[in-house]
Image (cartoon, helix red, strand yellow):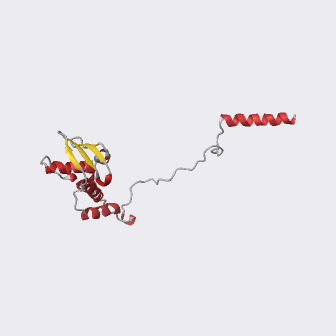
Amino acid sequence: MRKIVVVHKKIAKCKGPLTPGATELLQTIKNEAAEYTVIWTGGSKYQVSTHFNDHQDQRVVSLDERTCSCRRWDLTGIPCRHAVACIWDMGLHGRGDGVPEKWVHPVYWLETWKEVYKHTVEPVNGSDLWPKSACPTTLIPPKYHAQVGRPKKKRKKSAVEVAEAKAASQEKKEGKK
Ligand SMILES: [Zn+2]
């Protein structure tokens, strides 16, 4: 009950369109994506690369399939830096809206979060205000019954250990003779 209220308060503070965690993550991705150059290879495929700070990184993004060869988009549902660079490029060339938020999986949408937490739990009165039950019998716990035997505490020895112990005892006997 309390958790739901906490989430309701959090949701009320959010502007959207994504949940706070996703918004923050996408912002970091956007900052990284600004360093990338995009080459459209026709269809829905793009070659995305950067040489920022001597760090080479070149990947293939397919916007139709919502995948990138770095696999981050496939795994998280949030477009990776390569995909964001492509989405911006599409927008610049009039082939799409250019809004990365629209490419994020619905689980990260604020609307989805609201939908999940839209139900509230009814508050409950103290037991002195509860109606008396009409059930004639009183339920009592079952009788305790101790099980036969007790669980073994010692570890079961392996066949090798048993054989070694046998051989050792035989040697002892022969030694005494
Ligand atoms: Zn990627």
Where does the image place residue 167, in percent across and percent down from the top left?
75, 34
**Residue at (70%, 36%) from the top-left corner?**
162
Quadrant of the image for the N terminus? bottom left
**Residue at (85%, 35%) from the top-left corner?**
175
Q: Kindly give the residue lying farthest to the right in the view shown.
A: 177
**Residue at (58%, 47%) from the top-left corner?**
145
User: Left or right of 159: which side holds 88?
Assistant: left
Res 66 → quadrant = top left
User: Left or right of 39: which side holds 168?
Assistant: right
**Residue at (31%, 55%) from the top-left corner?**
53
Q: Is residue 78 visible?
A: no
Q: Name the foreground residue: 100 vs 161.
A: 100
Q: Kindly give the residue lying farthest to the front in the view shown.
A: 54
Res 9 → quadrant = bottom left
Q: Name the foreground residue: 123 vs 152.
A: 152
Note whether 42 is above or below 88 in the view shown: above
Where does the image place residue 56, in percent across and percent down from the top left?
31, 48
Where does the image place residue 39, in percent across and percent down from the top left?
20, 44
User: Left or right of 106: which side holds 93?
Assistant: left
Q: Is residue 145 visible?
A: yes
Q: Name the foreground residue: 177 vs 29.
A: 29
Where does the image place residue 100, in percent across and percent down from the top left?
21, 52
Q: Kindly give the residue lying farthest to the left in the view shown.
A: 94
Q: Name the foreground residue: 133 vs 87.
A: 87
Quadrant of the image for the C terminus? top right
Note whether 57 is above or below 157 in the view shown: below
For the image shown, how many numbered marks are present on the structure? 0
